[in-house]
């Protein structure tokens, strides 16, 4: 019985609730609403969150403080975007840049590359009748 309830709950979950860095139900700014509404931006946000957290979990030495400072500056820049293209461009660059932080010792975190995050396929074009 509990399994059925779990499946039902998963089917009811809003498709807008996919971004990992915040709760889409509480989205209030243009940027947050765009991330929640655009599946590509949601994927990029998820990838950035994963990459950032994975890098912070590695031994960055003093680089951890630098990575956090860069992330705060990037968020301020991101929040100035007024359209989806601006957001996609900034996210694609940051997804990759986060993983460029040098690891002092141990294994470098596995990161998702922005090139591996594909756009959602566009709907097929309808043929115009002549």
Image (spheres, helix red, strand yellow):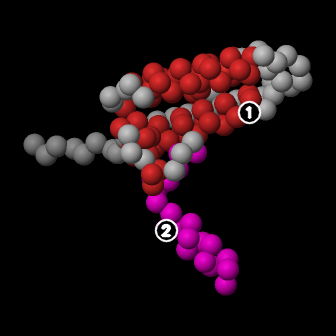
Residue 105 located left or right of residue 8:
right
Q: Find residue 87 and report its horizontal and vertical position in percent.
A: 42, 28
Furthest residue toward right: 106
Q: Answer few, some or many: residues within 10 Å of disc 2's Cα (few below 14, many 20 plus, some between 14 and 19).
A: few
Q: Is residue 121 visible?
A: no
Q: What are the residue bounds of the magenta stretch?
A: 1-20
Q: Viewer-proximal residue, 31 or 118?
A: 31
Q: Mark 1 against mark 2, which lies toward the viewer?
A: 1
Q: Residue at x 40, y 36 (%)?
A: 31
Q: Find residue 93 and report its horizontal and vertical position in percent.
A: 54, 20
Q: CA distance from mark 1 to mark 2?
A: 30 Å
Q: Answer few, some or many: residues within 10 Å of disc 1's Cα (few below 14, many 20 plus, some between 14 and 19).
A: some
Q: Residue at x 53, y 35 (%)?
A: 44
Q: Viewer-proximal residue, 27 or 46?
A: 27
Which quarter of the image is occupied by the N terminus? bottom right
Furthest residue toward bottom: 1
Q: How many marks?
A: 2
- Secondary structure category for the residue under label 1: helix
Residue 82 located left or right of residue 99:
left
Which quarter of the image is occupied by the C terminus? top left
Quadrant in the rendering for residue 71 = top right
Q: Find residue 120 and report its horizontal and vertical position in percent.
A: 45, 41
Picture layout, residue 41 above or below residue 87: below
Q: Is residue 2 magenta?
A: yes
Disc marking residue 54 = 1
Q: Residue at x 55, y 74 (%)?
A: 8
Identify the mark nearer the N-term, 1 or 2: 2
Residue pointed to by mark 2: 12
């Amino acid at each position: 019985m509990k399994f059925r309830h779990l499946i039902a709950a998963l089917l009811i979950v809003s498709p807008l609730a996919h971004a990992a860095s915040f709760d889409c139900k509480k989205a209030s700014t243009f940027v947050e609403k765009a991330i929640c509404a655009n599946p590509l931006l949601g994927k990029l946000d998820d990838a950035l969150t994963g990459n950032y957290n994975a890098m912070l979990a590695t031994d960055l030495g003093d680089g951890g403080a630098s990575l956090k400072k860069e992330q705060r500056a990037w968020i301020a820049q991101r929040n100035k975007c007024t359209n989806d293209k601006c957001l996609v461009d900034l996210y694609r660059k940051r997804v990759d840049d986060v993983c460029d932080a040098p690891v002092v010792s141990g294994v470098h975190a596995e990161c998702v590359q922005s090139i591996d995050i594909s756009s959602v396929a566009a709907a097929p074009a309808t043929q115009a009748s002549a």
